[in-house]
Image: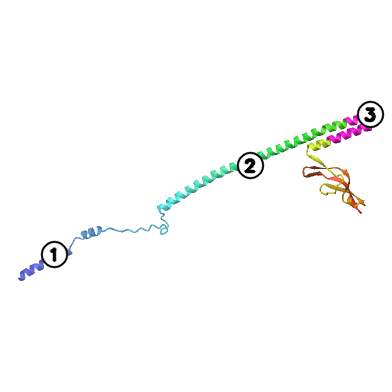
Amino acid sequence: MKEKDLQNEKKQSEVEGKGLAQDPSEEEKSDSDEPKVIVKDRRFWVDKDVVPTDAKKLEERLPTFLERMKTQLGQKDKKLQEVVGSLKEEQENFKKRVERDIDTQVAMAKMKLVSSLLPALDNLGRSIVAAESAHSFDSLMEGIKLVNAQFKDCLKDCGVEEIDSADRPFNPKTDEAVQMVPVEDKEKDNVILACLESGYRLGDKIIKPAKVTVGKAA
């Protein structure tokens, strides 16, 4: 009985010994089978010497984008300058054309006016020649009256009208009082008594006011 107990104890001790004497490589092997977790800090400001790949790509991409935008803006600015220059040139040409047209119209108006006055001048010359040849004052007067009528017709054709100053109240807008004459009749107060020089208007514009003598009640 005791021998069996001794044998059992011996076997148990051998088993325990084998367990304690296990090969260390097997322990390492068992440890290596477990997954390893490696934590890497990707924040680029942690290590100033290390620039992340994404940051490098960003640095490479931004200058290219800015250069492209700068090029596009430069092209648009160039086109804008061309358009502005073209508009300025067109405006200058238009201004010159308008000035030429105005000068042409003014010259044509002058020619028309002079052409209408030349017959009156010719008649005046003929009247003077006739008066000198016949030594007749009546011939001279007829010639002067004819020229006067022609001048008035010319002015009328140009839209110029003579201001009527016969026996009417004085109007400072159309008349210029050259002389004030005392009158006893109150009805003649501030009334034109005589026209020294005729006045003329073109439409609503006064070209020349009539120079008149005006009565003034005493």
In front: label 1 or label 3: 3
**Residue sitting at 8 percent across and 69 percent down?**
6
Q: Position of residue 18 (x, y in %)?
A: 15, 63
Query: In the picture provided, is 35 more to the left or to the right than 20?
Result: right
Q: Residue 191: where, in percent of width, then height?
A: 87, 49
Viewer-proximal residue among 107 and 93:
107
Name the residue rendered at 93%, 32% in the picture. 138
Give the main secondary structure, helix, strand or loop, of the magenta stretch.
helix
Residue 199 position within the rendered picture, expressed as x and y whole percent measured from the top left: 84, 43
Q: Amino acid at mark 2?
A: Lys
Q: Amino acid at mark 3?
A: Ala
User: Who comes first in sequence, dot 2 or dot 3?
Assistant: 2
Q: Quadrant of residue 165?
A: top right
Q: What's the residue type where badge 1 is placed?
A: Val
**Element type where label 3 sits in the image:** helix
Q: Is residue 8 above or below residue 124?
A: below
Judge depth for marks 2 and 3 and give the one in front. Answer: 3
Residue under label 3? 134
Q: Is residue 79 above or below residue 31?
A: above
Q: Which mark is residue 6?
A: none
141 displayed left or right of 156: right
Magenta stretch, residue numbers = 126-150
Quarter occupied by the C terminus:
bottom right
User: Are there few (<14), some (14-19), or many (20+) residues within 10 Å of tag 3?
Assistant: few
Q: CA distance from mark 1 to mark 3?
A: 178 Å
Q: Label 2 belongs to which residue?
A: 88
Q: For the residue labelled by badge 2, is the local secondary structure a helix, a strand or a loop?
A: helix
Return the residue at label 1.
15
With 169 as the anchor, is 26 left or right in this view?
Answer: left
